[in-house]
Image (spheres, helix red, strand yellow):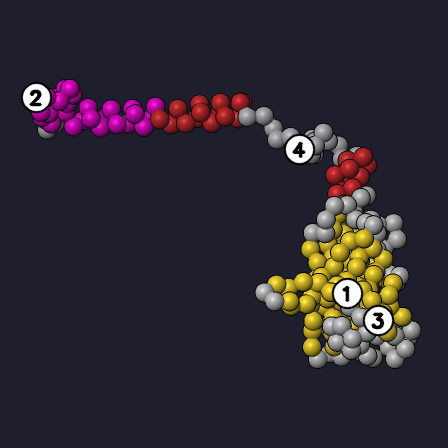
Amino acid sequence: MPRVMLAARSSPFRIASSSSSFASRASIRSRLRKMRSISASLIVRIIPRREAPTSTPYAFAGDVLTAAFWNEQVRDNLTELQPLTAAWISFTPTITNVTVGNGTHASAYLKVGRLVIVRYEFTLGSTSSIAGAPVFSLPAGITVSGALLATQVEFLDSGTTRFMGMVEVENNSQVVCQALSASGSFVGQVAPTSTIPFTWTTGDRIYVGIIFNSTS
């Protein structure tokens, strides 16, 4: 004879035997399984297949991968990413207020879309000299749009001491190097000369790095 489960008087549940309780639990589990199956079916029907963020869709099962697909989805995307792994392009800038003589250049730039990174490096030779603020031209066909995003300027005294400087854009097509000078409580700029920020000689170096957006 099955045992009887008694419920409190205040309980809304009726007295039920353990056998009927087991049966009701099995029924509930069965209904839950059916509900899960119906929910999964509805989700599949409601959510459409994923579309690409552009007007050209990705390939789906059953699609024919044509030459146009490979060109648009693979070749063109790789072409856009290629500058990120490209080698730096060397160039020789025009330098104003500097007698190049037998000095050496090691300047290069990298362009990714409209973002341009340029580094200038000039090492003085025995016949080189500094007469004023060095002015470097930008690579051919590149002009600055807006302000420089980042800059770095160093004047290296024969490989022993580094002096920091700053750079300004002039006519959107060249950069002017200035030395930094401490005056009172502030740091200001001063144009380099043959003796500023030190007496220039063979082996001294000017290094400039800039990042900016180009006009095209």
**Alpha carbon separation for disc pair 4 and 2:** 63 Å
User: Circle 4 is placed at which residue position?
Assistant: 53
Specify start and end residues of the magenta stretch as a single range. Answer: 4-31
Q: Nearer the viewer, residue 15 or 120?
A: 120
Disc 1 from disc 4: Cα separation: 52 Å
Q: Is residue 11 left or right of residue 87?
A: left
Q: Is residue 24 above or below residue 114?
A: above
Near-viewer residue (115 or 168)? 168
Magenta stretch: residue 134 in it? no
Disc number lying in front (3 or 1): 1
Residue 91 in percent (x, y) is at 87, 61
Question: Which residue has dot 3 on it?
Answer: 130
Task: Return the x and y of residue 97 as percentages of the image width and height.
Answer: 86, 65
For label 2, the crowd category at 10 Å Cα-Cα, with few meaning under 14, some 14 to 19 and many 20 or more, is few
Earlier in the chain: of badge 3 and badge 1, it is 3
Q: Is residue 17 above or below residue 194?
A: above
Residue at image mark 2: 9
Which part of the image, by quadrant, shows the N terminus?
A: top left
Identify the mark at residue 191; answer none if there is no mark.
Answer: 1
- The reply to whether discs 3 and 1 touch (Cβ–Cβ < 8 Å) is no
Q: Nearer the viewer, residue 27 or 151?
A: 151
Judged from the image, the secondary structure of the residue bearing numbered disc 2 is loop
Q: How far apart, in angstroms, are the residues tagged by discs 3 and 4?
A: 55 Å
x and y percentages locating residue 167 in the rendered image: 74, 59
- Label 3 crowd (10 A; few <14 / some 14-19 / many >=20): many
